[in-house]
Amino acid sequence: MTVDDVKAEIQRTLAGEPNTPIRFVLVSPASELVIATVGFHTISAVSGTAEIAYDVAPSHWGLGIATAACRAAARWGFEAKAWHRIQATTVLPNVRSQRVLERCGFKREGLVRNFRLVRGQPTDYWMYSVIPGEVQRGPHD
């Protein structure tokens, strides 16, 4: 993502368009570098639903950052946006991401076959979701 891409995304978010993707950036105070992002796409203002996604710099894996970010973002979606459902998908081998979702209170709903293209190939995904009241509290909550 370029600086111009980020600026454009910020402008769309600030414009308040109802189905615009939302992304939060986590910056290390020590290095001032982006260490993670978490956000929502496939937002439906009509249905009150969104899909959450997150990524963490490999240098910061295993520190609980994805879990904390996912938990905080999900709570924000329910409280600030009044969404009724937040869903997430993971490719089958991504066990680390599945554990993040489960620690946050997401439930695995099932297999979505040929859901998205990965390197040009239709790929199966696990579907997870959480609804209001199910987001698990963390150790610092």
Image (spheres, rainbow, N blue to C red):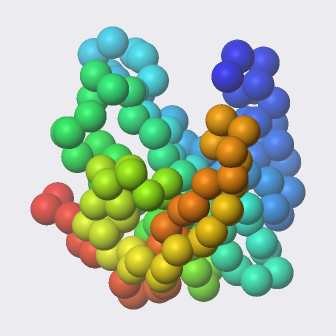
Q: Is residue 53 above or below residue 49?
A: above
Q: Can residue 104 be seen at all in this image of the molecule?
A: yes
- Percent of width and height locating residue 88: 53, 64
Q: Can residue 78 be seen at all in this image of the molecule?
A: no
- Percent of width and height locating residue 92: 44, 58
Tell me where residue 14 sits by quadrant.
top right
Q: Is residue 74 above or below residue 37?
A: below
Residues 116 and 27: in front is 116
Residue at 79% x, 74% y is 45
- Percent of width and height locating residue 91: 49, 54
Tell me where residue 123 sits by quadrant.
bottom right
In the image, 50: left or right of 111?
A: right
Residue at 82% x, 43% y is 12
Residue at 49% x, 79% y is 110
Residue at 79% x, 54% y is 20
Give the quarter of the figure containing the C terminus.
Answer: bottom left
